[in-house]
Image (tube, coloured by chain):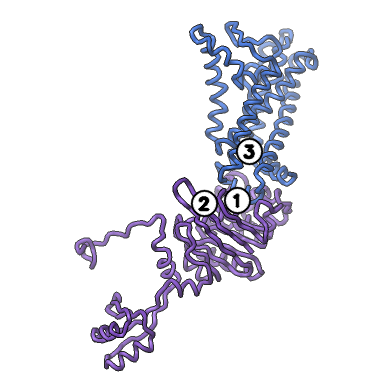
Chain colours: A blue, B purple
Amino acid sequence: MRDALRYEWTRLTTLRSTYWLIGVGLLCSALIAVIFGLAAGDDPLDPEILSASINGGAAFGIPFLAVFMAIIGIFSTGHEWRHGTIQPTLTALPQRSRLIAAKIAVVAAATLAVTLVSILLNLGVVLAFWGEAPGLFEEPLSAALLGYVVYTLIYMLTGLGLGLLFRGVPSALVVIFLMPLILESLIVGLAMLPALDWLEPLVKFLPFTAGSLLMTVGPVDLGMGADFGFFGRWGSGGVFAAFAAVIVGCGWYLFKRRDA
Amino acid sequence: MITAKGLYKRYRKTVAVNGLSFEVRPGVVTGFLGPNGSGKSTTMRLMLGLDHGEGETTFGGRSFASIRRPMNEVGALLEAKPFHPTRSARNHLRMLAAANRIPDSRVDEVMEFVGLGAVKRKKPKGYSLGMAQRLGLAQALLGDPKILLLDEPTNGLDPHGIHWMRDVLKSLAAEGRTIFVSSHLLSEMQLMADELVVIGKGTMIFNGDVETFVREFTQSAVVVRGPETAGLAAALKAAGATVSAGPSGELLVAGMELEKVGHLAFTEGVELHELSTRSASLEEAFMSATGASEQFAAQSPIRSVDEKGGVADA
């Protein structure tokens, strides 16, 4: 397994896109905190603004860092087919499950490290504007902070799984952008119409919507006061995690069975 | 030593590889010949476990998937340009080396060996096909393996490159390594290979040495040329030989030794300007062996009406 980890680490760190994706992700995330600081720096810091500043707006539906880490996840698997490197990879490392396990471990570790760096950067921005971060390590902010780390990790794993499932980059990118931004928003919006209220019970199972609940610091409100009966922070996180697990599991199973 | 047994691969209704079994011995270059689409690449991918099918292949007694750090035992080059376009060539090799505990110093060594030392930090997207093939060979040689599998390694190389590749493979074989190399360049194989595995439509056509292949798949003919050979042709036929006319009017006699043809001409009192044996090339043998098994046969070019046998004659 150590050989596979060494391979994946070298693969990840010798790719220029890894650095600029991480850089842009950190920058965009920090910029959101700067915008909040510029807009509300003179007001007292409430928990929702503090949480959203720390997670770079992820709780408000703009998860920059998670999306960029998901692209790194997609590249970790999808690039192998897009550029035909799966053939030399498997002649260097023919144990397919070991290869996928190493990809998950290395990219997950990188995601954790980058997310922690991003949190520290954004905390620096918050301290620069407000000079304090009240209650950051107390409930519910501490749980929301941990939820943000878990959310980014699951988002990345979904990307990695999609790259593996589709054996390429473009289809995986389309799904990772289309599903949360358009498909789920559409279903949530339609579920609020009286004529389509039968969609309401489905909303709590929408993976990206449920996943965003990992970062809430107050009551969930998706607009118009609709109550979708969400499972709570960790239950909703479980829905998102189960979705990622199904994607990764299917991709892994097919990777073992398909021709390379 | 490579041992392949009962290799079989089907894509829906098409059988790509049909029960291939062969051995590849160390110390010689074994050529893997077949027309386009005959299943050469699929066979190599099956051997390395990249494709799933039936049968088994062992490398020195072990299956490829069971070898820990396989690049140190088996080197493979299967596809042209399997590189990420923006990762430098050196980093591409470092990445593969990392999975096989091969030091970076060996990466630099093989890049120098294949002549890419000066461009090792460049991105492969700027490489020509010939340079990419050299990088592919560097990749295969990374772990200094005892066994090499190379799919069309001379594709895209210039004449110097082809000559260099041939010499490299022959010298690697002379060191006692097992070399299995596919090619559609028959003249290349004639110069490079000692043994042949020839397939057509995924089926084994021949497995043995080059000379036997030529002998088995070509009929050597006796060429007879003279000012008046019609009478001799009749006498040859009467004596049991098969006689046909060559492109420039000469007689091509099959089924009779040169000496007997000469004796018959002497007894018939026929003046001869040429009496010789025509031996076939590997290319002719290959065409004869695989002609009926071409998977994607193209049509012959249409000849002009002015030519003999052209469309006006049909």
The residue at 55%/61% (across/down) is B21
Mark 1 near mark 2, Cβ–Cβ under 8 Å? no
Q: Position of residue B159 (x, y in %)?
A: 50, 65
Q: Position of residue A170 (x, y in %)?
A: 53, 34
User: Gap in Å between the C-alphas at discs 3 and 1?
Assistant: 22 Å
Residue on which disc 1 sits: B49
Residue A18: assigned label? none
Mark 3 nearby-residue class (10 Å; few <14, some 14–19, many ≥20): many
Residue on which disc 3 sits: A76
Q: Taking A148 as reference, is B200 left or right?
A: left
Residue B174 seen in this snapshot: yes
The residue at 29%/77% (across/down) is B244
Same chain for marks 3 and 1?
no
* Foreground tag (3 vs 2): 2
Q: Nearer the viewer, residue B110 or A228?
A: A228
Give the letter of the chain under mark 1.
B
